[in-house]
Amino acid sequence: MAGEPDFADVDPDDIRGAQPEPAADADDPAAPSPDSGGPTPNGRGAGVSVVIARAIDVVARAVPWLWAHRIPRGRLSLIAGHAGMGKGWVAMAVTAAMTLGVALPDGEAPDGPRSVMWLEYEDDPHDTLRPRAELLGADLTRVHFVMGARDAEGRPVVPDAKALADLERQCAEIGDVALLVISPLNVFLGDAHDMYRDNETRAALQPLQDFAARSGIAVVGLAHLRKSETDDPVLRVLGSVAYTAAVRAALLVGRDPDTERRAVVQLKNNLGAERPGIELFLPFPDGLQWGQLDPELTADRLLARPAPRDAAEAGERARAVAWLTAQLADGPRWSRELDAAADVAGHTAATLRRARAEVGVVAEHATTPMGLAWWVRQPDQPADQPPPTPPPPPTDAGPRRRRTARGGAAEGPQGGGAHAGGVVLTLPGLPAGPDLISESPSDALRGGAAVGGDARVRVSEHHPPAVGLDGRDSTPPDRDEGTL
């Protein structure tokens, strides 16, 4: 059989004349003794027989494809991407094509309309999945949503991996299921395993892979990406590397950071040929529309760091990279603690985010007495050693703060020159009113130095008008903390 061997269920039709190796003669003095420390005749010990075959006796088979060179039948595949990029839309577009029996871009039409089973843990079938299926023209009689599950005593339970046997039974009863979508895949596997441990993840995926092989159904799991960035796109899938190592094909849905073009591209393909990326559009409320094939759209391109827009931004990023590297040199830091320190140092959230991408900072989470807390580390630092000190407590972020371009006028949520708080830089010789709004005094001072003059900096908060449920004015009072 093409691909990896299935040791759990060897099909005799796939092997011509294969026989287990004969056991060694117990009277043969050359045979190793079980007590000698050498291998037993069975290789692992009593009860295990290894079946081997010569390559000439293995029947070669072509890989059957659901979507040519992108999603194989009878195998487990992934569609990965950040939230909001459109991986659910892509999965629904594949669903619609299967139910209609039409070809997908750069693919071939299936052998007639087929049914699809959909197991969803995040989007609601009533207000999201069915409307999307209708919008894409799917045959709704062939789309089957898993709406829940019950245990042997009739109690409602989450339809996770323990429900796989009944799911397989129902697919067999439907009779023409070509695709099973699981979104997201890690929820289906349940919490009995650690998704960040390779051996546990592989063991949890094996029953799903066996189901796909037995039934010939293409199983497609949706997966999120890590917050951290690495040079290898395959390592960006959330959880253990076993997710992408175990599947035979994986697609990535994302956006080029420089051109803003959205696309679905190959992330991994062990069974087929390399194919170009496919541009896609999501102009709500029209749903997904396919664009042109473009070999320039690749996983590396979609996950690349955005290029600096000008020399000033490049300099800011370089300073932030040096600062961040120094901050993490002695060990990991709590994310909230690091963000607060970056604000004091004058690095904006956007610049810090780009610096983290350039350094390759890895984000982890830990359970603390105050709940779940995120911490960050250098790529070469241990993944299981959070900062030794307790995380800082959550703080009230207060009113939303904005900053304008250097030297530009600020506008609040409703326009008109109002602003939502922060540091106001007032430049001499200019009309009254804020000229620069920043998130920290140091950022504002740097902006003042850039435009020159005897800048005055004061810390203030101004709130847009607000009306309470009783119709009365509930706008918080403005606050002025004086000139720095």
Image (cartoon, rainbow, N blue to C red):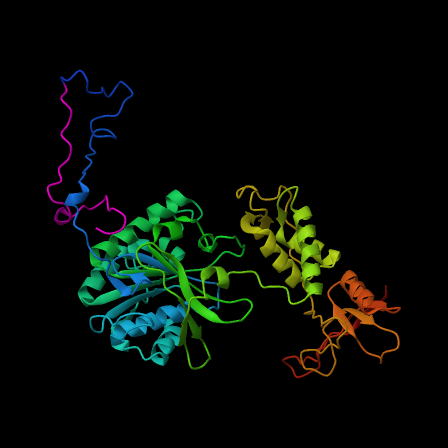
Q: In the rendering, at what x and y percent does residue 431 appear?
A: 85, 81
Q: In the rendering, at what x and y percent does residue 209 appear?
A: 28, 53
Secondary structure mostly seen in magenta is: loop
Q: Is residue 114 left or right of residue 479?
A: left
Res 123 visible: no
Q: Which residues are magenta?
A: 1-26
Magenta span contains residue 202: no
Magenta span contains residue 15: yes
Q: Which residue of the protein is positioned furthest toward the front in this rendering?
A: 295
Looking at this view, is 309 or 116 the one in front? 309
User: In this picture, is 64 found above or below 97?
Assistant: above
Res 397 visible: yes
User: In this picture, is 101 found above or below 378?
Assistant: below
Looking at this view, is 114 or 148 the one in front? 114
What residue is at 69 percent from the left and 62 percent from the top? 348
Q: In the rendering, at what x and y percent does residue 284 appear?
A: 46, 80
What residue is at 29 percent from the left and 65 percent from the top? 68
User: In this picture, is 286 found above or below 200?
Assistant: below
Q: Is residue 372 left or right of residue 221?
A: right
